[in-house]
Image (cartoon, rainbow, N blue to C red):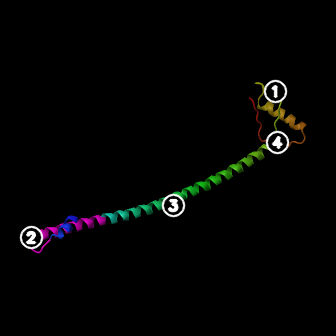
Amino acid sequence: MADILANADDYTPTSDNGELKRAVSSILDQMSDLHANTTRIANAFERIESLEKDLGDLRTENSQPNKQMIRQSQVIKQHQIFMEKIDAKEREKNLVVTGVPEGTYLDVETDEEKLEKIVEKLDRIEPYDAIIMLKRFGV
């Protein structure tokens, strides 16, 4: 187009009519190309705006699971604390007896008999029926 405009100064009324038609045709072609390029650029801008909106939506959606994970993490932490308190409360009731001989001849019934004797001798312990679990360590 710059060529045509540069040559426009050389135009004289006596110039060939065909030359003028070629110049006008060239200008129209270039304007058509310019319009096509402008349309492509406008479409690209619309697509960019659409993608930016989609990205914003994705960021919003992505923040929601993070908030849920934080809440779930807090709930799990509270449950862990609760379970630790229950476990500590259960350990408060433990009575550890040491010095009980170990051997292969001893079984659960023998251990229970020995425990009954210990409970009888210590009158501060609740009755034997209150004993929930008997566990031997080291065997």
Q: Where does the N terminus fall, quadrant-wise?
A: bottom left
Separation of residues labelled 1 and 4 (CA atoms): 24 Å
Which numbered disc, 2 or 1, marks the residue closer to the eye? 2
Which residue appears at 47% of the width and 61% of the height? 56
Which residue appears at 54% of the width and 59% of the height? 64
Identify the element where label 4 is drawn. helix
* Sequence-wise first label, 3 or 1: 3
Magenta residues? 11-39
Which numbered disc, 4 or 3, marks the residue closer to the eye? 3
Which residue appears at 30% of the width and 66% of the height? 38
- Residue 138 screen position, x and y as percent: 75, 30
Q: Which mark is residue 16?
A: 2
Examine the rendered structure and indicate whether residue 70 appears above or below residue 20. Answer: above
Which numbered disc, 4 or 2, marks the residue closer to the eye? 2
- Is disc 3 surrounded by few (<14), some (14 to 19) or many (20+) residues within 10 Å? few
Separation of residues labelled 4 and 3 (CA atoms): 60 Å
The amino acid marked with disc number 3 is Thr
